[in-house]
Image: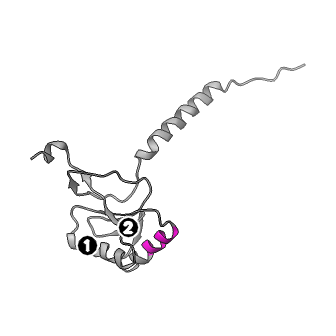
Amino acid sequence: MKIAPDINVTSLVDVTMVLLIVFIITAPFMRAGVKVDLPKAGARQSQPQRAVIIAIDRSNQLFVNQEKVTMENLAARVTQLHNNSPDLPILLEGDAAVAYGQVIKIMDAVRRAGIENVGLVLEQEPPSQTSR
């Protein structure tokens, strides 16, 4: 009678579980997207985990959930996403170098599409700068 070789996989399972736990903990902190230098503000509200994010970078390129769009089809794309998930908030990330008027045009296009609740994403200033 032959004895079948036995491989001990206990340590492999342990390492796998540790890696799984690390990824579960770090996943909410990783947010991929368009590189935008956000303007800073003293007070900041928490940002929801899921949202329709409209971003405009410093070269005035427009993105909806990391998908490049033009100003002409922005309203249609946002309306489509809003109709698919009406409970998701609409957030606008405008690079600090983008002209204020351009951000207003984007907000106006979204509002003309029938979506009234649009939030702005800001970075919080360090505490030393807000105490002036």
Residue 109 in magenta?
A: no
> Could you tell me which secondary element the residue under label 1 belongs to?
helix
Q: Is residue 5 left or right of residue 28?
A: right
Q: Pointer 1: what residue?
A: 104
Q: Nearer the viewer, residue 113 or 74?
A: 113
Color theme of the render = one colour
Residue beneath the point at 25% across and 73% down = 104
In x, y percent, where is residue 74?
39, 75
> Quadrant location of the N terminus?
top right
Query: How far apart are the two marked residues, 1 and 2, measured between alpha carbons?
Result: 15 Å
Contact (Cβ within 8 Å) of mark 1 with mark 2: no
What's the residue at 61%, 25% (across, down)?
A: 11
Identify the mark nearer the N-term, 1 or 2: 2
Amino acid under disc 1: Ile
Determine which quarter of the picture holds residue 4: top right
Asked where in the image residue 64 lies, by quadrant, the reply is: bottom left
In the rendered image, which residue does mark 2 sit on?
63
Closer to us: 41 or 36:
41
Magenta region, mostly helix, strand or loop? helix
Q: Position of residue 124 (x, y in %)?
A: 24, 50
Q: Amino acid at mark 2?
A: Phe
In the image, residue 78 lies in the stretch drawn in magenta: yes
Q: Of all residues shown, which one is farthest toward the right?
A: 1
- Is the residue marked by circle 1 packed among few (<14), some (14-19), or many (20+) residues within 10 Å? few
Counting from the top left corner in percent of width and height, residue 51 is at 42, 60
Q: Is residue 8 left or right of residue 65?
A: right
Which residues are drawn in magenta? Answer: 77-84
Image point 57% across, 33% down: which residue?
Answer: 17
